[in-house]
Amino acid sequence: MTTLLQVENVTVRFGGLVALNNVSFTLNPGEIVGLIGPNGAGKTTLFSTLVGLVKPSEGRIVIEGERIDGKRPHQVARHGMTKTFQNVSLFPDMNVRDNVVVAALSHSNLADARRTADAALERLGLASIADAEVADLTFPQRALVEVARAMATRARILLLDEVMAALNPAEMDAVMDVLSSLRDEGLTLFVVEHHMRAIMRLCDRILALQFGGLIASGTPAEIAANPVVIEAYLGREKSKEA
Ligand SMILES: Nc1ncnc2c1ncn2[C@@H]1O[C@H](COP(=O)(O)OP(=O)(O)O)[C@@H](O)[C@H]1O
Ligand SMILES: [Mg+2]
């Protein structure tokens, strides 16, 4: 399988803090990869670095043979990768369609952006609420509008940062069905979620991050059985639930 995204030895320092430490991995077309790790592990920093909001101190980021590290977010978007923003993505006073149109404007004029937005809303089953204000939506609808915004940039690689955080299990299942269908159509999804059940069900492969370093990668079953991961993350979550 051809590699879509290649991350090689990426290190990010914020002053004296090493937020990412020599991180290397690849993403293939048409897979859902999960990124797990305790708070502060560097998950959001990794997403920000991939899309050009944070410049890596060291390392290379390559999409289909072309280096994108050091490029600005709008340039990275043209290479087909975009991310949602943890907590703050949507404009609450704007309607659903306009929220998505704004994202589509990154690569097209207003008429094209409207068409792209409507296609994304249609695809995600949101056409009937296109005129609703975001503030009036349910949490799962908001999650899907975030996905629609990412799709409207014509991204092939969507980085989803805790878009399901506010959802109950049934709502999560519904959103995960949509995400799985996008994967089946060839999109690549890289997903941060705290809910282990969701990550385990949704992902083809999982990467585990701790203190800025990758400590494991594998299938959900391999990750669930990995003693290093259990110690670093799952064990802690389990003891919290107990
Ligand atoms: N812009 C920044 N400047 C300085 N430190 C940062 C910045 N962004 C994140 N950090 C620090 O980097 C570490 C990783 O944070 P983050 O990537 O947000 O973790 P996660 O998303 O896994 O919870 C944390 O110690 C955080 O305080
Ligand atoms: Mg985060």
Image (tube, rainbow, N blue to C red):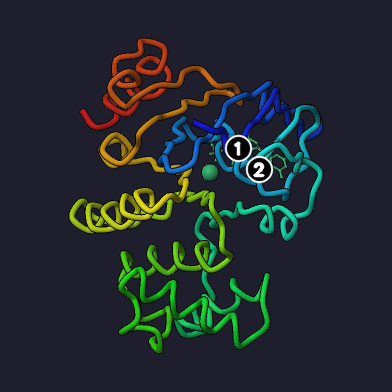
Question: Going 63% across and 24% down the picture, which residue do you hit?
Answer: 23
Query: Could you tell me residue 6's position as x and y percent?
Result: 63, 32
Give the vertical position of 133 relative to 8 (above or below). below
Residue assigned mark 2: 50
Identify the residue at image location x=53%, y=35%: 27
* 214 over 123 or under it: above or below: above
User: Relative to residue 202, is residue 141 depicted above or below?
Assistant: below
| Label placed on residue 16 | none
Q: Position of residue 16 (x, y in %)?
A: 79, 27
Vertically, is 135 above or below 205? below
In the drawing, does residue 136 fall left or right of residue 221?
right
Q: Secondary structure at mark 1?
A: strand
Image point 42% across, 36% down: which residue?
34
Residue sitting at the far left: 170
Rendered residue at 67%/71% (across/down): 107
**Left or right of 7 in this view: 139:** left
Residue 72, percent from left and from top: 78, 54
Give the residue furthest to the front: 1
How far, Cα to Cα, is label 1 from label 2? 10 Å
Closer to the eye: label 1 or 2: 1
**Which residue is tagged 1?**
5
Please state if 181 lies on the left or on the right of 12 as rendered: left
Label 1: how many Cα within 10 Å (few below 14, some 14–19, many 20+): many
Kindly state the secondary structure of the residue where label 2 is placed. helix
Instruction: Looking at this view, name the residue that lies furthest to the top.
Output: 227
Please tell me how crowded label 2 is: few (under 14), some (14-19), or many (20+) other residues with Cα within 10 Å: many
Q: Quadrant of the C terminus?
A: top left
Q: Check whether the beta carbons of the residues at disc 1 and disc 2 lie within 8 A of each other.
A: yes
Kindly identify the amino acid type of the residue bearing the numbered disc 2. Answer: Leu
